Image: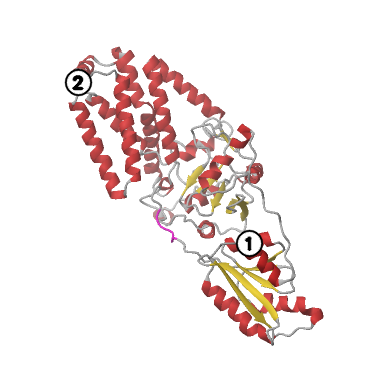
Amino acid sequence: MGFWQKLFGKKSNTKKAEEMKPNKSLEKNLKIIKEGFLKDCDDIVYREIELGKEGQYKAATIHVDGMADKKLVNEFALNNLMVMARGIDPEPNILKKGLYELVEKQNIAVTELKEVETIDEAVTNILSGETVLLLDNYDKIIIIASKGWPARSPAEPETEAVIRGPRDGLVETLRMNTTLIRRRIRDHRLKVKNYQVGVRSKTDVSVMYIDDIVDKKVLKELDTRLNKIDIDAIIDSAQIEELIEDKWISVFPQIQNTERPDVVASALYHGRIGIVVDNSPFALIVPSTISAMLQSAEDYYERWQIASVIRMLRYFCLLIALFAPALYVGITSFHPQMIPTDLALALAATRRGVPFPAIIEALIMEITIEILREASIRLPGAIGSTIGIVGGLVIGQAAVEAGIVGPLMVIVVAITAIASFAIPSYNTAISIRMLRFLILFAAAAFGLYGIMLASLLILIHLCGLKSFGIPYLSPFITFLADADDLKDTLVRAPQLAMNNRDINAVKGQKNRMDDKREETFDIEKKE
């Protein structure tokens, strides 16, 4: 059961279909599939054929129009069966073995062929894009690998664009995504374990990990949580993320998501686990920490000095996005003595005639910015960015001229909005935006004391938060165990200095680089 079902004591109203064994009669099997499982499905293609010299042995293929590769089915399955298999005339006592072996080993020229023993499995394979082959007088069903639905080619991710780095991104096809990741990890210890989640959707899910690096406890916990999911359908990886995370009530995302195969590959090299879901271009990475949420793929493709400065700037932007409006409200409302005299007089002059207290000013502007941000997302790209910029300028200027808010408040809200865009993880940025309102109300009630109280509550919550057993604030609260983990947090140390994997890797596989780093590449010195 999922967390909501556990919380409210509800059981799933979906029941797995009773498994049905196939009959030796081809006609009966076709009738069961046509009138039982796939009734009123006009996109299902049935093709009955005859085998043997006299056409005395019957067979049939079934596939979904548009999901199976027609060229593969026609040229490498039907053509071979209808032309080459007509020469077989096995004796009755070896009919079963002879006909099946001819079909399996000599006539169907496809890379993957398997057999299933229930009609339920056959129907699931049909709806997954495979082609089913039924043979008369044979009580098993042959599955021909023929998936061939339209697929989007890998393109640069829009949500994680970088200046320097790979340009390919994950797509909605599961096997293409696992291929993009495996292309970067040519190691036989890279494992791919498949699941089917969703009673009705039967969505394919692949769990990827490097066997000798991953923590087996985390892997076992993930396996348990995936197997406990009881839901009718999985449409996107976001649903799995919500169903397997540790604390669903927390606003902080405990599972990292990404559109970039290089990010997934890098995480696997550090002992983490990738979860790829069919029909979703977003892969999940577990376990995750807050430092991972604030890292960008570009940090590792630029020089370490540049990456370190940008990363520190990113942390500073997080503080601005979280505290700037609250500090404005707290200081102007409760602690004006902290402001220099000249600035206080200038601020008082700009707020002359404003009929609302500072908290109302902040709420008006913050809510307006959030509405503009949400509206710009829903509009087409070029129009959305234009509406966001023009709308913000026009509304801010009009609000100041109308005397509803002060000009400094407009500046503070604008800087806050810009700073929130510097956070690489979109769902982390949303969490910060939500908590900003909590801290804002605390500042309106108690001033700076309220900001400190709200910050302590958030910090206490973060200290108790875990992602698959890994503390969410790692390595900031676990650096005493391994100080090397701090080399990739607030700053990004040089590659030569980061010779160990992070906290997620199993103890025996911490080292990732040879320790012989003293060699110099100075040509003059060598000469």
Front position in the image: 38 or 482: 38
Residue 148, label in figure: none
If the image is split into quadrants, where does the N terminus sit? top right
Picture disc at residue 350: 2
The answer to which quarter of the image holds residue 22 is bottom right
- Using the rendered view, name the quadrant where residue 61 is placed: bottom right
The three-letter code of the residue at mark 2 reads Thr
Residue 512 in view of the camera? no
- Tell me the quarter of the image containing the C terminus: bottom left
| Residue depicted at 47% across the width and 39% down the height | 293
Q: Position of residue 111 (x, y in %)?
A: 61, 71
- Residue under the point 44% across and 37% down: 428
Earlier along the polypeptide chain: callout 2 or callout 1?
1
Q: Distance between the residues labelled 2 and 1?
A: 71 Å
Is residue 77 highlighted in magenta?
Answer: no
Left/right placement of residue 491 relative to residue 484 reads: left
Of 525 and 19, nearer the camera is: 19
Please provide percent x and percent y for residue 469. Answer: 61, 36
- Tell me where residue 53 appears, x and y as whole percent: 69, 87
Which residue is labeled 1 in the image?
A: 123
- The mark lying in front, picked from 2 and 1, is 1
Is residue 348 or residue 241 the one in the foreground?
A: 241
Numbered disc 2: secondary structure: helix
Q: What segment carries the magenta color?
A: 152-156
